[in-house]
Structures are given as structure tokens and as C-alpha cells.
Image: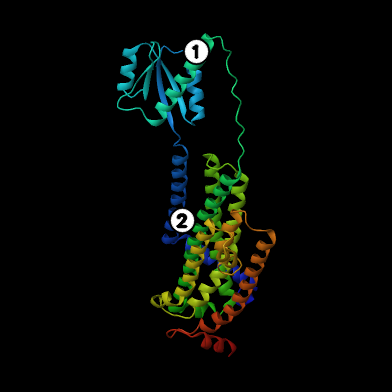
Amino acid sequence: MSGRELGSAALVRLVAGREISARLRDKNFIVSSVVILVVLIGLLGFQVAVSSGGESTRIGVVGSSAGLERALEAQGDALDVDVSIVDLADEAAARTAVEADEVDGALLAGGAEPELLVRQSAGGSLSAVVQGAVGQLAVSEQLAEAGVPALEVPEVAVTALEPDADADGQRVVAAIIGVGILYGLLIMFGQFVAQGVVEEKASRVVELLLATMRPWHLLAGKILGLGLLGLAQIVLVAVVGVAGALTFDIVDVPGELIGTAVSVVAWFVLGYAFYAAVFAVAASLVSRQEDLGSVLTPTTLVLVAAFVVGLQAASDPTSALAVVTSYVPGLSPLVMPVRQAAGEVAAWEVALSVALMVVAIVAVVRLGGRIYAGALLRTSGKTKLREALAAERA
């Protein structure tokens, strides 16, 4: 069956399959994918290390009693310190345990004057826990000797003025990480599209391809094939990130985290469709890899600006800059997810931003397709936009 007998959908699928096959064999693509996953796992490991770094202390006790142990544990709870109590037989055992670093300190509670043995100095939490517990126990014993019944201390009610602050912070951090990965993938896959276009022009392969298909088939197939790879990659990153965060109990609001990840993936689809078309059209204007940087720089700078504004939106999602740019096509994929994570966006705002982005994608694809068709067969130097449009009309 000849190429002309194939329908448009089949031709687009053919080009898409070729792009996927070529990139799966590309070492740069494989290395970049591994690097992204390694960085993500490293971030998860760092967060686990930070989260598990809560303060704790091991206290050896000579002459322990149930009342003293309860007082030490209660004092530890009050100071948010994890207290572990080790019963020791005598002072000699206490000194040995301290010198061997088996305990942070040893409390000699059997005598008239309690004494705390430490190797060098009593850390802040160790001293505070022991002093508070001994003082509390001494007051209780003196009151009991005086015939005063134990005092009932009322429990203090805690009212959080911003109960969702931690959850909001976790969502924003997840969105920043997601937008950072999204930014990297848009740059990487945009470059893949551009490099493929120039390679085909430089090797004159494009002339053979256009003998069996139209320019828009080639453009659509490239965008679709690499887009599916990019989507698979960011979904994999999202799954690994969410699964890791839930497994290691890094987040308190798993539903919100999943929602943020889905939002980032959805914005990748829109952002990729926009930027892949722009990168492909820009690349069609040149015939050498050496000239590629000059035509891609403006688009790359827009992506950099969007990423910077997205980071700024994390600290102030209601600022005029963040709000305005979250509606600007090309900038919104890297700004709106952060504003959504901060909980400062109404549903109609997201819908408006998506609608504007879709309109922009349609406009870029329509105009870009004309430029692409007019410039694709011009292999002598750099083609101007006006020349490409004139060639397409001719």
C-alpha cells in the first residue's frame, strides 16, 4: 500500500510512532529520564530525613518509680521531645551507660538531692525534661505530705487561627516541584521537536517524507509522538512522587497532593501542545543545528520568565503579577498550578485560563502550520517569517 493511500490519521500515527521509536533509542532521553527520577527520589529522601529529625533523648534512671517515669514522659510530651527511659541498677551502671553513650544522661533519683550525670553537658531538651519532671514530682510530694489533695490542672484548649496552613504549604511545595519538572520537560521535549525538524531538513529526508504526506501530517505526528512520551514521563514522575510521599508519610493531606499532581499533569498537556508547535515552527526556519539557538532563544526566555513568575506566585499568589500571568497563554501552565495549590483560585478563573490557552494553541497551530509548510523545503540559510508565509501561499 503506498503512502498516498493512507488516510491522514494513519500518516500522523506513522510519524508519531517513528518519533517515539527514535527517542526511546536516544541515550539523551534515557539519561534525562533517569536523572529526573533520581532527583525526585533524592528530594523525597531529603524530606524524609528532615521530617524524621524530631528531637529525642534517652534518660537513664537510678531509683526509678512509676511517678517519676510518668513525670518524665509527661514533660517530654509537653516539650515535644521523644523521651526513652532506661532503668539502671546503681550509680556505677549509670556512669558506664553515660560514658558509653547508651543514654544522654543518667538521673540519680534515690538520694535526697537528685543528680543528673552527663558526659559533657546537658542539652537543652535533656535538662528541660529532667528539671521539669523532678520539680513537678517534688511539688506533688510536698503537697501530699501537707495533706493538700492533688491539684487538677485544667487542660488548655488550643485554637489554630490557620488550621490549614501546613496543608496549604505542602500543596504549594508539591506544585513548585511539579512546575519545576514541567518546565524541564517542556524545554527538553521542545528541543527534541526542534532538533528533529532541523535534522530532517539538513539530511533532505523531509523531501522524501513530503512526497507521501502533507506538512501538517509531519508536524502533527511529531507533536503527538513526543507529546505521548512527555505525558508518560510526567505521569510516571507524578506517580512516583505521590506514592513516595504517601509511603513515607511526608504529607498530611493525600487527597490534596493527588489533586495538585493531576493539575500539573493537565497543564503539561496544554503547555506542551503550545510550545511544541512554537518550537517546531521556529526550527523550520533554519537548516543547521548551529542556527537553532538563535530562533529558539525567544521562546526559551518566555519559558524561563514563566518559571520565575511561578516561583514568585508561591510566596504571593494574589499579587497582580501572579494573577495576570496566570491568564496569559504560554505563561499560565507554569503559574496557574501554583496559584491553584495555594487555594487562591476560583473555578471560573481556572476555566478562563484553560479557555485562553486552548484558543492560543489553535491559533499557534493554524498560523504555525502555514509557516512550517512554507519553510520546510527551504534549506538555504535562515528563512524569514514573511518568506515562509509567501511560499506557503504560492
* 124 vs 36, nearest the viewer: 124
Looking at the image, residue 69 lies above or below residue 370? above
Q: What is the spatial separation of the Cα atoms under label 1 and label 2, in whole angstroms?
A: 68 Å
* 198 vs 81, nearest the viewer: 81
Q: Secondary structure at mark 1?
A: helix
List the residue tagged with mark 2.
Answer: 33
Amino acid found under the numbered disc labelled 2? Ser
Measuring from the top left, give residue 351's x and y in whole percent.
68, 63
Looking at the image, residue 199 lies above or below residue 88? below
Q: Across the whole image, how many numbered discs are drawn on residues? A: 2
Tag 1–tag 2 contact (CB < 8 Å) = no
How is the rendered protein coloured? rainbow
Looking at the image, residue 73 lies above or below residue 247? above
Task: Confirm whether residue 377 shows in the render.
Answer: yes
Quarter containing the N terminus: bottom right
* 305 vs 255, nearest the viewer: 305
Measuring from the top left, give residue 171's x and y in whole percent.
57, 50
Measuring from the top left, give residue 4's x and y in whole percent.
61, 77
Give residue 142's mark: 1
Residue 112: name its quadrant: top left
* 293 vs 249, nearest the viewer: 249
Measuring 59% from the left and 67% from the top, which residue is drawn there? 324
Mark nearer the viewer, 1 or 2:
1
Task: Confirm whether residue 233 shows in the render.
Answer: no
Measuring 59% from the left and 88% from the top, which residue is drawn there? 393
Measuring from the top left, give residue 360's x and y in whole percent.
62, 73
Q: Residues within 10 Å of mark 1 (few under 14, many from 20)?
A: few
Quarter containing the C terminus: bottom right
